[in-house]
Amino acid sequence: MFPLIEVSGSARERGQQHGLQAKARVERSIATYARLFAYCGIDWQGAQRLGAGYREVIGDLDPALLAEIEGIASGAGRHVDEILALNARTEILPPSYPGEPHPNLQKIAAANAKEGVPDWGECTAVAVKPAQSTTGTTLLAQNWDWLGAQRAALVLLRVRDAGGASCLTLTEAGMLAKIGLNNRGFGVCLNILRSSDDGSHPGVPVHVLLRALLERDSVADAVAFASKLGFGASSNVLCADAAGDTAALEFSPRGLEVVRGADAALCHTNHFLAPAAAKHQASLAPSLSTVPRLARITALTGAHKGRFSPADLQRMLRDESDGTLSICRRPDPSLAPEACIETVASVVMDLGERVMHIAPDVPSKVDFTPVALGEAVLA
């Protein structure tokens, strides 16, 4: 299982605790993204300059989140611009990723190494309302598909603020949040999207948004909050709450579109479903398999008889019917490491019970372990 890091106190104190306890994994995150940005033609110094451009946007959204980022840098002994670059990694990556390597890849990688930078897709998500679950609670699940090398940088972050609110998130060390739930029974999953407008102007980084959303009370609250923001890149946040509301929040530099599902389960992969947003969909590499994965998870949930149990969703997330392009993705040895997407972890959340069931590898290879918001790992 991934390390469980507990943070509390003021925003800067929480960040310092995160950075100190996850120092080695923060370094792994930096190594992964320095190499990935080099693949796209961006050296690590350039990535830091780009990351620094999001400081003001994050501070305007919530000064406490910026203070927490500064605390992570302090605790991990890194420059704050490095941690900003991690949290803005989606916005920094060009819309064409993953594609062919940049012609200057080797030159940039060598320059990174000379400066001492360490060296060492995305997801299928589904939400089920209480009336359709065997537990009588909302279920929210996801396979997180990303670079296999980054699995060694993942952490479980349990955050408690001074006011008593708390959340549990599976994220990359140095980053504020990703997949998670809070003590109000609200949860989020992430599907990276790409539009032709990405990078046209700065906006709230998606991984900062995810943490801000984990401070919301419900789907309605999340929609109202996100609708007021501007974004620099595209993503979808599949969210749900303990009361049974579910929605896909598709956003891009053009704004927010909210997608609701009419079926028993609301499913999403890595392309826009809202017609207005889909007109600006960027070209995606076939290796992301977003269209066939959506068709497959929709078929699996649509054919399911009776109510969904957590075990049913785990079984669907283990589906390998399409080889390396399946819902459950094993690495494709024919691809370069910087473009090879695999399932780094799988999560099924019970929002009523405030529990995340986590598979810390390709889910067909390992068991799911429950981790409760308010408790230690359940063996």
Image (tube, rainbow, N blue to C red):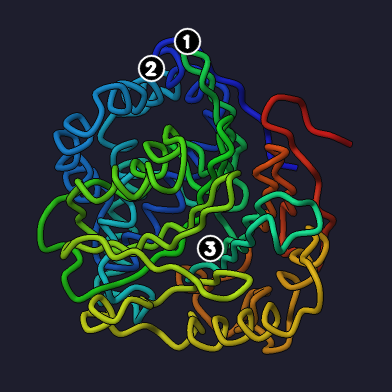
Q: Residues within 10 Å of mark 2 (few under 14, many from 20)?
A: many
Q: Look at mark 2 in the image and give the residue it sits on.
A: 11
Q: Report the mark closest to the observer, 3 or 1.
A: 1
Instruction: Give the numbered dot on residue 140.
Output: none
Quadrant including the N terminus: top right
Pick the front one: 158 or 3: 158
Q: Residues within 10 Å of mark 1 (few under 14, many from 20)?
A: some
Name the kind of residue labelled 3 in the image.
Answer: Leu
Q: Look at mark 3 in the image and give the residue it sits on.
A: 147
Q: Look at mark 1 in the image and give the residue it sits on.
A: 9
Q: Between marks 3 and 1, how big is the CA–CA gap?
A: 32 Å
The picture quadrant where one finds residue 253 is bottom left
Name the kind of residue labelled 1 in the image.
Answer: Gly
Q: Residue at x 25, y 75 (%)?
A: 277
Pick the front one: 278 or 37: 278
Q: Between marks 2 and 3, how big is the CA–CA gap?
A: 29 Å
Side of 197 where 156 appears, left or right: right
Pick the front one: 52 or 309: 309
Name the kind of residue labelled 2 in the image.
Answer: Ala
The picture quadrant where one finds residue 279 is bottom left
Q: Residue at x 81, y 73 (%)?
A: 306
